Image (cartoon, rainbow, N blue to C red):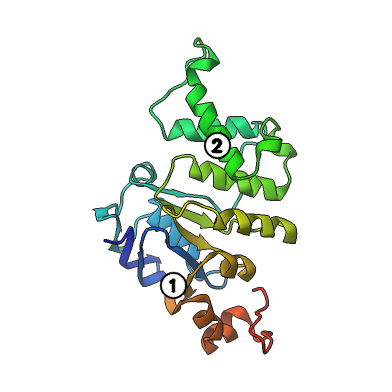
Amino acid sequence: MSQLSVKDISKSFGALSVIDKFDLELSMGDRHAVIGPNGAGKTTLFNMISGWIPPDKGTIEIEGLDITNHSPQAVTQAGLARSFQKNTLFDWLTVAESLRLAVQASSNVRFNFLQPARRFGGLQQRAHEIARQMELEPVFHREVRTLSYGQKRQLEVGMALACSPKILLLDEPAAGTSHAERATLVRLLTTLPKNVTLLLVEHDMDVVFGVCSQITVLNYGRIVASGTPEEVRQDPEVRAAYLGESASHDGEVAHV
């Protein structure tokens, strides 16, 4: 059984077809990227899978459970978490507070300010574990506003991991980061547990090729290619339209 099954989903806004008959099957532990130019429908696809907008037709299943048209909260409870393309952090919170609240949101524990903080030690311990996993321990007690942009992206991934998802959707996690920050992010993503399935939207090909073993290419909501990084890298239509023709003879491809 597939862990994530997307079957024949479509979405239009008025006369504009954004996603047209899209299919995707992911098994546990897959590392899969969706790439394509701006306006290809990538974020709309993520929004449908994560419950933020309904598809016009088609079905979405997590381990055989039909989550089509379910709310984002219900989709999260089914085992899927996501990050967003734009920063959604609260600058005045610390890293510790951000992670603790993310852990709390996925648990049945509710804070009571009349109770001592030690009553919530389990949440704090889990927040520490995620900070360690995302290499945020040195800034654990710093406010988000003081972090580098790369550290903020690491925190967003960490907050998505707080609910221990089966499936993790990351929408351009490397956007706005420096070369060194992207390298750190790639390294961290490659060390995610193998029982977490990763679906990634990303423009930076170093991130895509460094993390994912399968790639799907979208153009105006339609799949134009799908396969391994090498297969996609060598596809003439993909090279011309999405990866550029500045690829050298040794196979290295310029960023989109």
Tag count:
2
Residue furthest to the top: 114
Q: What crowding class fits label 1: few (fewer than 14 Cα within 10 Å), some (14-19), or many (20 or more)?
A: many
5 and 69: which is toward the camera: 5
**Quarter of the image that includes the N terminus:** bottom left
Asked whether the viewer can see residue 244, the reply is yes
The residue under the point 69% across, 50% down is 150
Q: Is residue 252 above or below residue 93?
A: below
Determine which of the numbered discs, if any, sits on residue 129 in the image.
2
Residue mark closest to the camera, 1 vs 2? 2
Tell me how far mark 1 sits from mark 2, CA to CA.
38 Å
How would you rate the neighbour count of disc 2 (Cα within 10 Å): few for under 14, some for 14-19, many for 20 or more? some
Task: Tell me: 194 left or right of 69.
Answer: right
Residue 22 is left or right of residue 64, and the answer is right
Residue 73, horizontal then vertical, whole percent: 38, 41
For badge 2, the amino acid type reads: Glu
Vertical position of residue 17 compared to residue 122: above or below:
below
Task: State whether residue 110 is above or below residue 208.
Answer: above
Sequence-wise, the earlier of marks 1 and 2 is 2
Residue at 73% over, 61% down: 179
Q: Which residue is mark 1?
A: 221
Place of residue 226 in the rendered image (x, y in percent of width and height, measured from the top left): 44, 77
Q: Which amino acid type corresponds to the residue marked 1 in the rendered image? A: Gly
Q: Secondary structure at mark 1?
A: loop
Element type where label 2 sits in the image: helix
On screen, residue 210 versus residue 18, left or right, reads: right
Q: Is residue 242 above or below residue 42?
A: below
**How far across and how far down the image is residue 140, in percent?**
66, 33
Q: Position of residue 137 (x, y in %)?
A: 66, 37
Residue 88 seen in this snapshot: no
Residue 44 tag number:
none
- In front here: 59 or 116? 116
